[in-house]
Amino acid sequence: MSGIDVVNGVVGAFIGMLFAVLLQQPLQDAWYRLRRRSAGAVRSLRRKEESGPAWRTFSLGPLQTSALIVEGDGESPISPESVYVHVLDGEVELPSDMVGWRDEITEESERLRAEGRTPLWNGPRYAVESVDISRTAFEEKPEVHLRLRPTDYYTFLAAQQLDRRLPDGTSPRARYLDPDEPMKAPAFLQCSFAVNIAVVTADDMLVVSQRSDRVRMAPGVWNSSVNEGLSRHIDSSGRNAPDLYALARRGMREELSLEPHESSLELLAFVLDTGKRHWSGHFYARLTELRSSDLQARMSRGVADRWEHQTIEYVPFRPAAVARYMLREDRVHRWAPLAPALFHLSLVHAFGRTPVERAEAQVVRRL
């Protein structure tokens, strides 16, 4: 072998080593990226299609409720002119195999009266035939048609026994309700429409109530600032349909001694408790001058329906503070189903969706 061949061999080897060193890392990186893409492609092939109901009830971390927000996102209030309330003729009738349940309630009330105890007052009320949501043609604003039928409290109590066995072994829930069609239900199972109001004082404190142990429905649970049911006797003037804003103002007067001129009032949403078939108009009320201390002093001088609440608490009305309060260990499983959604919507209305959801997510992560 000549000297030139030796030199060429050494130079070639050196250049080969140089290229190997220079190209080693890029080749490794390219190989790593190719492997990741291949693994991702394999995983995507293995992943199955997923589906779920379009209607989901309100939840926040470990707080799971049966509150279905049917209309309203908190940011844009529903104007009074967009809500139409219709009262239909003909009272609600229970199916023949549930009539006996109502008779039992009548007998219980008579027994309590005979014993000198407080009987069950059979007040006239409304059942919800339907809630229809549409949009205006040009502005696409919500338009709500609420259709009501006459009923009474005893029928409501009988229909609340959704899981009681019927003679054929089924239950009202199984026979008449479809979990995949939450908006569809017979009127006799929807004998309740109420307003729930989040009241915020002038010094930014959210009023939270605990229901009395004396009430028949959901005693002792934590609830909205005000919860008032629609009364056929009180809220319908003559043959006129009831006004939901008037109902909200009546509830604030009876439960917190607040007069109409002392707050602003906005309707944020229509919400359905799918567990008990209770309908609600969710309102946000902001006190213009009364601070939390003023409200406490006012209530110390007398409240019309004081017996409905056993505790009133005041929570700083800020997204993180309210989220922490709702998720407290001694609160998270003791809420009335409709209250957490109301507080969330009220925060969104006051602060905007993005800041509220960011604060709530941070609170959930820290649990």
Image (spheres, rainbow, N blue to C red):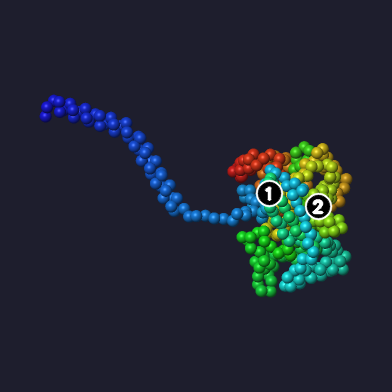
Q: In which quarter of the image is residue 77?
A: top right
Q: Residue at x 71, y 64 (%)?
A: 186
Q: Helix, strand or loop at disc 1?
A: loop
Amino acid type at image mark 2:
Asp
Count of number-bearing discs? 2
Depicted 65 relative to depicted 13: above or below: below
Which residue position is annotated with label 2?
Answer: 243
Quadrant in the picture for the C terminus:
top right
Which residue position is annotated with label 1?
Answer: 137
Closer to the camera: disc 2 or disc 1?
1
- In the image, 160 versus 45, the foreground residue is 45
Q: In this view, does 41 lie to the left or right of 105?
A: left
Q: Quadrant of residue 161?
A: bottom right
Judge whether residue 50 can be spotted in this image: yes
Q: Which residue is drawn at 65% across and 59% down?
A: 182
Q: In this view, does 165 lie to the left or right of 15?
A: right
The spot of residue 33 in percent (x, y) is 39, 41
**Callout 2 environment at 10 Å: few (<14), some (14 to 19), or many (20+)?**
some
Q: Residue at x 71, y 51 (%)?
A: 143
Judge whether residue 331 can be spotted in this image: no
Depicted 204 relative to depicted 278: above or below: above
Separation of residues labelled 2 and 1 (CA atoms): 25 Å
Q: In this view, does 44 lie to the left or right of 134?
A: left
Q: Residue at x 86, y 66 (%)?
A: 113
- In the image, 15 versus 235, the foreground residue is 235
